[in-house]
Image (spheres, rainbow, N blue to C red):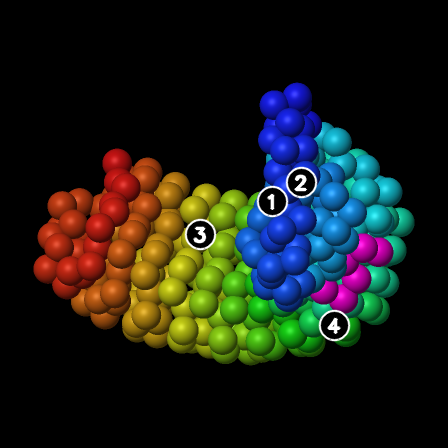
Protein backbone atom coordinates (compact mmCIF):
# COMPACT_ATOMS: atom_id res chain seq x y z
CA UNK A 1 0.00 0.00 0.00
CA UNK A 2 1.51 3.37 -0.98
CA UNK A 3 1.66 6.44 1.24
CA UNK A 4 -1.35 8.17 -0.28
CA UNK A 5 -3.54 5.08 0.04
CA UNK A 6 -2.33 4.44 3.60
CA UNK A 7 -3.05 8.03 4.51
CA UNK A 8 -6.58 7.80 3.21
CA UNK A 9 -7.24 4.67 5.23
CA UNK A 10 -5.72 6.19 8.36
CA UNK A 11 -7.89 9.30 8.09
CA UNK A 12 -10.92 7.16 7.39
CA UNK A 13 -10.26 4.68 10.19
CA UNK A 14 -9.84 7.30 12.90
CA UNK A 15 -13.35 8.70 12.56
CA UNK A 16 -15.70 7.45 9.85
CA UNK A 17 -14.80 3.79 10.14
CA UNK A 18 -15.64 3.58 13.83
CA UNK A 19 -18.90 5.43 13.20
CA UNK A 20 -19.84 2.99 10.44
CA UNK A 21 -19.13 0.07 12.75
CA UNK A 22 -21.53 1.52 15.32
CA UNK A 23 -24.30 2.45 12.89
CA UNK A 24 -24.33 -0.61 10.62
CA UNK A 25 -24.86 -4.19 11.76
CA UNK A 26 -22.15 -6.74 11.03
CA UNK A 27 -24.39 -8.56 8.56
CA UNK A 28 -24.79 -5.45 6.41
CA UNK A 29 -21.07 -4.68 6.50
CA UNK A 30 -20.33 -8.25 5.43
CA UNK A 31 -22.79 -7.80 2.58
CA UNK A 32 -20.99 -4.64 1.46
CA UNK A 33 -17.60 -6.35 1.69
CA UNK A 34 -18.90 -9.24 -0.44
CA UNK A 35 -18.83 -6.96 -3.51
CA UNK A 36 -15.11 -6.18 -3.17
CA UNK A 37 -12.33 -7.89 -5.10
CA UNK A 38 -9.39 -9.68 -3.50
CA UNK A 39 -7.04 -6.68 -3.57
CA UNK A 40 -9.57 -4.31 -2.03
CA UNK A 41 -10.49 -6.81 0.68
CA UNK A 42 -6.84 -7.14 1.64
CA UNK A 43 -6.54 -3.36 1.83
CA UNK A 44 -9.65 -3.09 3.96
CA UNK A 45 -8.23 -5.72 6.29
CA UNK A 46 -5.46 -3.26 7.18
CA UNK A 47 -7.78 -0.43 8.24
CA UNK A 48 -8.61 -1.71 11.72
CA UNK A 49 -9.05 -4.85 13.78
CA UNK A 50 -12.80 -4.75 13.21
CA UNK A 51 -12.42 -4.49 9.46
CA UNK A 52 -9.71 -7.13 9.46
CA UNK A 53 -12.18 -9.59 10.93
CA UNK A 54 -14.88 -8.57 8.46
CA UNK A 55 -12.64 -8.55 5.38
CA UNK A 56 -11.18 -11.96 6.13
CA UNK A 57 -14.51 -13.57 6.93
CA UNK A 58 -14.84 -16.70 4.83
CA UNK A 59 -18.21 -15.62 3.44
CA UNK A 60 -16.43 -12.85 1.50
CA UNK A 61 -14.18 -15.34 -0.23
CA UNK A 62 -16.66 -17.44 -2.19
CA UNK A 63 -15.13 -16.48 -5.55
CA UNK A 64 -11.41 -15.95 -5.99
CA UNK A 65 -9.46 -15.29 -9.20
CA UNK A 66 -5.69 -15.24 -8.76
CA UNK A 67 -4.77 -14.90 -12.44
CA UNK A 68 -3.41 -11.38 -11.96
CA UNK A 69 -1.07 -12.68 -9.27
CA UNK A 70 -0.04 -15.87 -11.06
CA UNK A 71 3.71 -15.26 -10.89
CA UNK A 72 3.55 -14.77 -7.11
CA UNK A 73 1.22 -17.61 -6.14
CA UNK A 74 2.91 -20.56 -4.48
CA UNK A 75 1.44 -23.67 -2.94
CA UNK A 76 1.32 -22.31 0.58
CA UNK A 77 -0.89 -19.43 -0.60
CA UNK A 78 -3.49 -21.86 -1.94
CA UNK A 79 -3.30 -23.90 1.25
CA UNK A 80 -3.81 -20.81 3.41
CA UNK A 81 -6.73 -19.66 1.27
CA UNK A 82 -8.36 -23.06 1.57
CA UNK A 83 -8.01 -23.01 5.35
CA UNK A 84 -9.37 -19.48 5.56
CA UNK A 85 -12.32 -20.00 3.20
CA UNK A 86 -13.15 -23.62 3.91
CA UNK A 87 -16.68 -24.54 2.99
CA UNK A 88 -17.50 -21.01 1.79
CA UNK A 89 -15.41 -21.18 -1.37
CA UNK A 90 -17.43 -21.95 -4.50
CA UNK A 91 -15.21 -20.67 -7.33
CA UNK A 92 -11.43 -20.54 -7.64
CA UNK A 93 -9.26 -19.66 -10.62
CA UNK A 94 -5.57 -20.56 -10.50
CA UNK A 95 -5.18 -20.03 -14.23
CA UNK A 96 -1.53 -19.65 -15.13
CA UNK A 97 -0.24 -20.36 -11.61
CA UNK A 98 2.71 -22.48 -12.71
CA UNK A 99 4.06 -23.13 -9.21
CA UNK A 100 0.97 -24.92 -7.92
CA UNK A 101 1.37 -28.68 -7.46
CA UNK A 102 -0.60 -31.71 -6.34
CA UNK A 103 0.21 -31.44 -2.63
CA UNK A 104 -1.28 -27.95 -2.34
CA UNK A 105 -4.36 -28.94 -4.28
CA UNK A 106 -4.87 -31.98 -2.07
CA UNK A 107 -4.99 -29.68 0.96
CA UNK A 108 -7.33 -27.40 -0.98
CA UNK A 109 -9.66 -30.28 -1.86
CA UNK A 110 -9.79 -31.46 1.74
CA UNK A 111 -10.72 -28.01 3.02
CA UNK A 112 -12.99 -26.72 0.24
CA UNK A 113 -15.52 -29.49 -0.26
CA UNK A 114 -18.20 -27.15 -1.61
CA UNK A 115 -16.14 -25.95 -4.57
CA UNK A 116 -18.20 -25.89 -7.77
CA UNK A 117 -15.96 -24.12 -10.29
CA UNK A 118 -12.20 -24.76 -10.44
CA UNK A 119 -9.87 -23.37 -13.12
CA UNK A 120 -6.43 -25.00 -13.28
CA UNK A 121 -5.67 -23.88 -16.85
CA UNK A 122 -1.91 -23.94 -17.36
CA UNK A 123 -1.06 -25.46 -13.97
CA UNK A 124 1.45 -27.72 -15.66
CA UNK A 125 2.89 -29.24 -12.47
CA UNK A 126 -0.23 -31.14 -11.54
CA UNK A 127 -0.93 -34.74 -12.51
CA UNK A 128 -3.53 -37.41 -11.82
CA UNK A 129 -3.12 -37.01 -8.06
CA UNK A 130 -5.03 -33.73 -8.17
CA UNK A 131 -8.04 -35.27 -9.90
CA UNK A 132 -7.99 -38.16 -7.46
CA UNK A 133 -8.14 -35.65 -4.59
CA UNK A 134 -10.98 -33.75 -6.26
CA UNK A 135 -12.82 -37.02 -6.74
CA UNK A 136 -12.54 -37.91 -3.07
CA UNK A 137 -13.43 -34.58 -1.51
CA UNK A 138 -15.13 -32.24 -4.02
CA UNK A 139 -18.30 -34.05 -5.03
CA UNK A 140 -20.16 -30.81 -5.83
CA UNK A 141 -17.73 -29.84 -8.59
CA UNK A 142 -19.54 -28.72 -11.76
CA UNK A 143 -16.93 -26.88 -13.83
CA UNK A 144 -13.31 -28.02 -14.17
CA UNK A 145 -10.68 -26.56 -16.49
CA UNK A 146 -7.51 -28.63 -16.93
CA UNK A 147 -6.32 -26.99 -20.16
CA UNK A 148 -2.65 -27.72 -20.89
CA UNK A 149 -2.22 -29.87 -17.78
CA UNK A 150 -0.21 -32.20 -19.95
CA UNK A 151 0.51 -34.84 -17.28
CA UNK A 152 -3.20 -35.66 -16.97
CA UNK A 153 -4.02 -39.20 -18.16
CA UNK A 154 -7.02 -41.51 -18.37
CA UNK A 155 -6.66 -42.14 -14.64
CA UNK A 156 -7.82 -38.59 -13.96
CA UNK A 157 -10.96 -39.06 -16.02
CA UNK A 158 -11.70 -42.36 -14.31
CA UNK A 159 -11.37 -40.67 -10.92
CA UNK A 160 -13.67 -37.82 -11.96
CA UNK A 161 -16.26 -40.30 -13.21
CA UNK A 162 -16.36 -41.98 -9.81
CA UNK A 163 -16.45 -38.97 -7.50
CA UNK A 164 -17.61 -35.97 -9.54
CA UNK A 165 -20.88 -37.10 -11.05
CA UNK A 166 -22.28 -33.55 -10.99
CA UNK A 167 -19.69 -32.40 -13.51
CA UNK A 168 -21.22 -30.31 -16.31
CA UNK A 169 -18.28 -28.51 -17.96
CA UNK A 170 -14.89 -30.12 -18.52
CA UNK A 171 -11.93 -28.69 -20.42
CA UNK A 172 -9.03 -31.06 -21.04
CA UNK A 173 -7.70 -29.30 -24.14
CA UNK A 174 -4.12 -30.22 -25.04
CA UNK A 175 -4.07 -33.08 -22.52
CA UNK A 176 -2.77 -35.34 -25.25
CA UNK A 177 -2.29 -38.45 -23.11
CA UNK A 178 -6.05 -38.95 -22.89
CA UNK A 179 -7.47 -41.74 -25.06
CA UNK A 180 -10.87 -43.26 -25.78
CA UNK A 181 -10.64 -45.34 -22.59
CA UNK A 182 -10.56 -42.18 -20.50
CA UNK A 183 -13.51 -40.69 -22.38
CA UNK A 184 -15.47 -43.92 -21.97
CA UNK A 185 -14.93 -43.89 -18.21
CA UNK A 186 -15.70 -40.18 -17.90
CA UNK A 187 -19.00 -40.11 -19.74
CA UNK A 188 -20.10 -43.35 -18.12
CA UNK A 189 -20.07 -41.64 -14.74
CA UNK A 190 -20.78 -38.02 -15.73
CA UNK A 191 -23.84 -38.32 -17.93
CA UNK A 192 -24.91 -34.75 -17.19
CA UNK A 193 -22.02 -33.19 -19.11
CA UNK A 194 -23.10 -30.13 -21.06
CA UNK A 195 -19.74 -28.91 -22.36
CA UNK A 196 -16.60 -30.79 -23.35
CA UNK A 197 -13.49 -29.06 -24.64
CA UNK A 198 -11.14 -31.64 -26.15
CA UNK A 199 -8.94 -29.46 -28.35
CA UNK A 200 -5.63 -31.03 -29.22
CA UNK A 201 -6.44 -34.40 -27.65
CA UNK A 202 -4.81 -36.05 -30.63
CA UNK A 203 -5.29 -39.65 -29.51
CA UNK A 204 -9.08 -39.43 -29.52
CA UNK A 205 -10.79 -41.32 -32.32
CA UNK A 206 -14.28 -42.19 -33.53
CA UNK A 207 -14.84 -44.68 -30.71
CA UNK A 208 -14.41 -41.80 -28.25
CA UNK A 209 -17.27 -39.94 -29.92
CA UNK A 210 -19.49 -43.01 -29.92
CA UNK A 211 -19.24 -43.11 -26.13
CA UNK A 212 -20.23 -39.44 -26.02
CA UNK A 213 -23.20 -40.20 -28.27
CA UNK A 214 -24.48 -42.87 -25.90
CA UNK A 215 -23.97 -41.15 -22.56
CA UNK A 216 -24.21 -37.37 -23.13
CA UNK A 217 -27.71 -36.45 -24.31
CA UNK A 218 -27.47 -33.06 -22.54
CA UNK A 219 -24.34 -31.98 -24.41
CA UNK A 220 -24.55 -28.40 -25.70
CA UNK A 221 -20.89 -27.56 -26.42
CA UNK A 222 -18.27 -29.81 -28.04
CA UNK A 223 -14.84 -28.63 -29.15
CA UNK A 224 -12.76 -31.14 -31.10
CA UNK A 225 -10.29 -28.73 -32.70
CA UNK A 226 -7.19 -30.51 -34.02
CA UNK A 227 -8.45 -33.97 -33.05
CA UNK A 228 -7.03 -35.22 -36.31
CA UNK A 229 -8.15 -38.86 -36.04
CA UNK A 230 -11.84 -37.96 -36.01
CA UNK A 231 -13.79 -38.94 -39.14
CA UNK A 232 -17.41 -38.83 -40.29
CA UNK A 233 -18.14 -42.10 -38.51
CA UNK A 234 -17.60 -40.59 -35.08
CA UNK A 235 -19.07 -37.17 -35.77
CA UNK A 236 -22.25 -38.55 -37.32
CA UNK A 237 -22.69 -40.63 -34.16
CA UNK A 238 -22.45 -37.53 -31.98
CA UNK A 239 -24.99 -35.69 -34.11
CA UNK A 240 -27.46 -38.55 -33.75
CA UNK A 241 -27.12 -38.72 -29.97
CA UNK A 242 -26.63 -35.08 -28.95
CA UNK A 243 -29.64 -33.23 -30.34
CA UNK A 244 -29.19 -30.25 -28.00
CA UNK A 245 -25.83 -29.32 -29.51
CA UNK A 246 -25.41 -25.55 -29.96
CA UNK A 247 -21.65 -25.18 -30.40
CA UNK A 248 -19.41 -27.47 -32.43
CA UNK A 249 -15.79 -26.96 -33.40
CA UNK A 250 -14.04 -29.46 -35.65
CA UNK A 251 -11.49 -27.04 -37.10
CA UNK A 252 -8.40 -28.89 -38.21
CA UNK A 253 -10.21 -32.24 -38.40
CA UNK A 254 -9.19 -32.79 -42.00
CA UNK A 255 -11.07 -36.07 -42.51
CA UNK A 256 -14.53 -34.53 -42.11
CA UNK A 257 -16.75 -34.52 -45.21
CA UNK A 258 -20.28 -33.45 -46.15
CA UNK A 259 -21.66 -36.53 -44.39
CA UNK A 260 -20.91 -34.92 -41.03
CA UNK A 261 -22.38 -31.54 -41.95
CA UNK A 262 -25.50 -33.20 -43.33
CA UNK A 263 -25.94 -35.23 -40.12
CA UNK A 264 -25.49 -32.05 -38.12
CA UNK A 265 -28.20 -30.33 -40.11
CA UNK A 266 -30.64 -33.22 -39.79
CA UNK A 267 -30.13 -33.87 -36.08
CA UNK A 268 -29.05 -30.65 -34.33
CA UNK A 269 -31.56 -27.88 -35.15
CA UNK A 270 -30.45 -25.73 -32.17
CA UNK A 271 -26.94 -25.24 -33.53
CA UNK A 272 -25.73 -21.65 -33.13
CA UNK A 273 -21.97 -21.75 -33.70
CA UNK A 274 -20.06 -23.98 -36.12
CA UNK A 275 -16.30 -23.87 -36.67
CA UNK A 276 -14.95 -26.02 -39.50
CA UNK A 277 -11.80 -24.15 -40.51
CA UNK A 278 -9.31 -26.17 -42.55
CA UNK A 279 -11.83 -28.92 -43.30
CA UNK A 280 -10.98 -28.88 -46.97
CA UNK A 281 -13.30 -31.71 -48.10
CA UNK A 282 -16.52 -29.82 -47.33
CA UNK A 283 -18.69 -28.64 -50.23
CA UNK A 284 -21.90 -26.71 -50.86
CA UNK A 285 -23.96 -29.90 -50.61
CA UNK A 286 -23.45 -30.31 -46.87
CA UNK A 287 -23.91 -26.65 -46.06
CA UNK A 288 -27.13 -26.49 -48.05
CA UNK A 289 -28.67 -29.15 -45.80
CA UNK A 290 -27.28 -27.39 -42.74
CA UNK A 291 -28.66 -23.98 -43.72
CA UNK A 292 -32.11 -25.34 -44.46
CA UNK A 293 -32.40 -27.01 -41.05
CA UNK A 294 -30.35 -24.94 -38.58
CA UNK A 295 -32.12 -21.59 -38.61
CA UNK A 296 -30.60 -20.45 -35.30
CA UNK A 297 -27.05 -20.25 -36.65
CA UNK A 298 -25.25 -17.11 -35.45
CA UNK A 299 -21.55 -17.65 -36.18
CA UNK A 300 -19.59 -19.80 -38.63
CA UNK A 301 -15.92 -20.25 -39.39
CA UNK A 302 -15.38 -21.67 -42.89
CA UNK A 303 -11.78 -20.54 -43.31
CA UNK A 304 -9.84 -22.63 -45.84
CA UNK A 305 -12.93 -24.64 -46.82
CA UNK A 306 -11.70 -24.30 -50.36
CA UNK A 307 -14.47 -26.21 -52.15
CA UNK A 308 -17.43 -24.08 -51.11
CA UNK A 309 -18.81 -21.46 -53.47
CA UNK A 310 -21.17 -18.51 -53.33
CA UNK A 311 -24.06 -20.97 -53.26
CA UNK A 312 -23.31 -21.77 -49.61
CA UNK A 313 -23.39 -18.08 -48.75
CA UNK A 314 -26.67 -17.66 -50.62
CA UNK A 315 -28.28 -20.56 -48.72
CA UNK A 316 -27.09 -19.16 -45.41
CA UNK A 317 -28.44 -15.71 -46.22
CA UNK A 318 -31.85 -17.15 -47.11
CA UNK A 319 -32.34 -19.62 -44.26
CA UNK A 320 -30.26 -18.27 -41.35
CA UNK A 321 -31.54 -14.79 -40.45
CA UNK A 322 -29.62 -14.72 -37.14
CA UNK A 323 -26.23 -15.22 -38.75
CA UNK A 324 -24.05 -12.29 -37.69
CA UNK A 325 -20.47 -13.50 -38.11
CA UNK A 326 -19.04 -15.50 -40.99
CA UNK A 327 -15.37 -16.21 -41.62
CA UNK A 328 -14.52 -17.66 -45.02
CA UNK A 329 -11.76 -17.69 -47.57
For label 2, the residue is 13
Closer to us: mark 4 or mark 1? 1
For marks 4 and 1 on the same chain, the one whose residue lies earlier in the sequence: 1
Q: CB of mark 2 within 8 Å of CB of mark 1?
A: yes
Which residue bears the numbered disc 3? 250
How would you rate the neighbour count of disc 2 (Cα within 10 Å): few for under 14, some for 14-19, many for 20 or more? Answer: some
Q: Which mark is residue 16?
A: 1
Label 2 vs label 1: CA separation?
6 Å
- Measure the alpha-carbon separation of dots 3 and 1: 59 Å
Total numbered labels placed on residues in the image: 4
Secondary element at tag 1: helix
Does residue 86 belong to the magenta stretch? yes
Tell me if residue 296 comes above or below residue 96 in the rendering.
Answer: below
Q: Quadrant of residue 109?
A: bottom right
Give the residue displayed 35% in from the left and 55% down from the top: 274
Residue shown at 33%/65% (left/top)? 271
Quarter of the image for the N terminus: give it: top right
Residue found 30% across the figure and 50% down from its top: 300
Residue identified by numbered label 4: 139
* Spatial separation of the CA atoms under disc 3 and disc 2: 57 Å
Nearer to me, 137 or 20: 20
Secondary structure at badge 4 equals: loop
Mark 3 or mark 4, earlier in chain:
4
Amino acid sequence: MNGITRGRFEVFSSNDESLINKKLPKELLLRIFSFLDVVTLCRCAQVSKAWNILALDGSNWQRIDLFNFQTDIEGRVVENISKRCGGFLRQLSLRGCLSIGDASLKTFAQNCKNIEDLNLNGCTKINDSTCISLSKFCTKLKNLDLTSCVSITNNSLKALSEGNRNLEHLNISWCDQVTKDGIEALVGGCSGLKAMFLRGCTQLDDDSLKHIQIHCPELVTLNLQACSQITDEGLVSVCRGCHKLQFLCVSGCGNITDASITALGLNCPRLKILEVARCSHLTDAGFTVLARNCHELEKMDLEECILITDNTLIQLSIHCPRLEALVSG
